[in-house]
Structure formats: C-alpha cells, structure tokens
Amino acid sequence: MAPTLTVAPGPTVRTHKGAVAVVTFKAALPPGFHANSNTPSDAYLIPLTLKWTGGPLQADGITYPKAAQEKYSFSEKPLSVVTGQFSISTKFKVPANAPTGPAAQNGTLRYQACNDRMCFAPKTVPVTVSLDIE
Amino acid sequence: MQWAAAAGVAAILGVVACSPSKPAKPLVREDSKRQHAPDFALKDADGRLVHLADYKGKVVLLDFWATWCGPCKIEIPWFQEFQRKYKDRGFEVVGVSMDDDGWKVITPFVQMKKINYRVVLGDDKTGDLYGGLEALPTTFVIDRSGRIASVHVGLAGKKDFSDAIEKLLDDPAVPANGNSVRSDGADADRRAGTHG
C-alpha cells in the first residue's frame, strides 16, 4: 500500500499588515518509508517540494527539514531523505495592502516515497494555513 | 500519475516473489493458471509503436520502472545481462518507463546506463491493464504464449528472474493457433502440467 504523507493542520496564524510571519507545519510519513529530501542525492530523484499557490501572503523563503543520510539495500551510498515526522517553515511577508480578517494561504507539498524494496509514484498533497490578519 | 491499488496486481495476476532474500516458490505459475498478458501500444524513443504482440513466441521480461526509482536501478543491470545472455534463445526485455516527465528524463538515463533493451514510455492506461502498478519496480515474466508466468512487485532476486527465464526458455511450446498473445485458454489446457 502506498504510504500517505499526512500534513497536520496548524493553529491559525495571527499577524498584521507589513509584518513578517514564520509559519511552520508538521508532516509525517508512516514508519518504514522515506521521501527524498529537498536536496536529493541523485539528480533523477524527486525532491520534497513545497509551493505556495494562493493567499494574501508573499513567501520569502522556505526552510526544509534537515535531511538524514540513510543507507538502503538498493543504494550503494546513503540517500538524503526525510522520515517520520518533520517540519517545514516558510517566512512570509504580509503586504501592507493585505485584506484584514480571516484568510487562508494555500500550497502543495510534493513528495516521492519509497521503502527499502520499492518506490511509489510521486504525490502532491494540499497544505493550508489559516490566517487572521489585523 | 494516477495509480490504482496494488492489491489488484496481487489478486488479479498473482505475485509470486517480493523479497530478494526469500525466493518464492514456484518461480513460475503453473501453466494452466497463467493469464494472458494484456497487449499494449506504447512508443519507444524513436516514436515507433511497440506492441507486446510483437514479441509473440518469445519469453518477455516486462519491467515497469522509473528513473526516480532506486530499487529499479538495481535490477536494470541484471536485465541488461539477461538481454545479452538469452536474446539468441528467444528472449527480450521490454522496459516500460512510468516517468511523468517522459523522454527528456528517460533518454539521458538510458544513455547513461547503456540500456541494451527496448524502452517504451508507459501511461496510466497500460498501468491499469497490468493491475494498477502501485509500486515500482513491477516486473512481469511472460511465457512464449504471451501469458504471465510470474509477477514481482518490488526489488526481487536476480536468481528468481534468471531461473524463471531459463525455465520458460526451455519450454518450446507455442500455441498451435498461435498468432496472438491473447490466444484462448485451450492452449493453457493443452499445455497444463508441462511445467513443474
């Protein structure tokens, strides 16, 4: 069965116009599975990639989880991967003209998972952050 | 790429081996229990249509893989070796790449690995025909009558493949009506019991 990466909904982010907000959310893979990190060991491997696709905030840098170097039976050298629970942070700028009140920042997280014997098709899961802009 | 549940592969086609350390038995399904491998029409790097039916009368190792699949890369050198070793006995490897990015990633990979067998670009339709292909590699060993003799989901053992291939190559039988990979079950009945 293909592993599903779960993204935990975070608390509503309260911020204000002109501010800088750092938003962190947690994601997790089931035990026994790994996904390539954002900087995979091999150019053919598909990286963990967060894209913000809509919302009032302007992304100004993404901090991916620290990769683990793990050796698998199918690889001659360790691979740069993420496993278990991990966090991804994004630094946002709140535009001076952002609308006040509740809003949502939407994005997608693309990953490609394997275990030590097989790999699964790349998947993209939605990521949503609830906002309250003052 | 929308892939269906892997259970389909196991249930419909019969997974016979999954672990490199635990070769499953039997290496190939009994003759009477083999199902016909679905035909397909997929393009190779030169844009030529390749049909499974093109390989009638041959033993075929049909490997569904992708450039992003680490375990697939372990098996590819084995398959290159099999292609060299068994080609003259009526054997062919066909690699079906499931890369969404198509030839722009497949071609340099094939060149880098010096892959010596035909590679075609797969699609969801073909994946569905073969039970969904939830995981890669998924490899089918197809007998001379165009029937699936074994399925391996995930990294398998090299010897599992070579033993199955040799067993199938030693069977010269081809359907009497024999002009289709979709020949009817009469051949299976006729040949039942000819394999151990």
Image (cartoon, coloured by chain):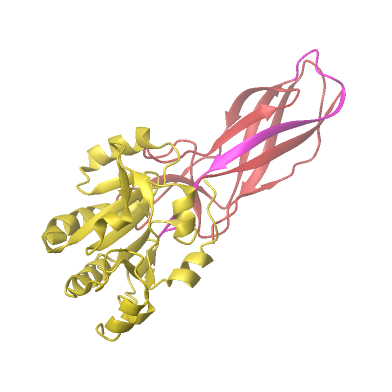
* Above or below, B44 relative to B126: above
Where residue A128 appears, as percent x and y from the top left, is: 72, 37
Residue A114 within the magenta-colored segment of the rendering: yes
Q: Which residues are magenta?
A: A94-121
Q: Is A65 positioned to the left or the right of B164 in the image?
A: right
Display colour for chain B:
yellow
Q: Relative to A21, is B135 above or below?
A: below
Residue at far front of view: B177
Residue at 38 percent across and 73 percent down: it is: B16
Q: Is residue B2 visible?
A: yes
Side of B63 relative to A57 (left or right): left
Query: In this image, A33 relative to A71: left or right?
Result: right
Residue A60: where, in percent of width, then height?
A: 63, 21
Query: Per the image, is B136 magenta?
Result: no
Quadrant where the C terminus of chain B sits is: bottom left
Please tell me which residue is depicted at 35% across the width and 50% down the height of the picture.
B96
At x 13%, y 64%, the residue is B89
Tell which chain the image draws in red.
A
Picture coordinates of residue B69, whole percent (x, y): 39, 49
Visible residue check, residue A74: no
Q: Is residue B31 above or below residue A48?
A: below
Frontmost residue, B188 versus B24 = B188
From the top left corner, tell me how far across and down residue A56 is, in percent.
Answer: 76, 23
Figure label count: 0
Q: Which corner quadrant of the image does residue A125 belong to?
A: top right
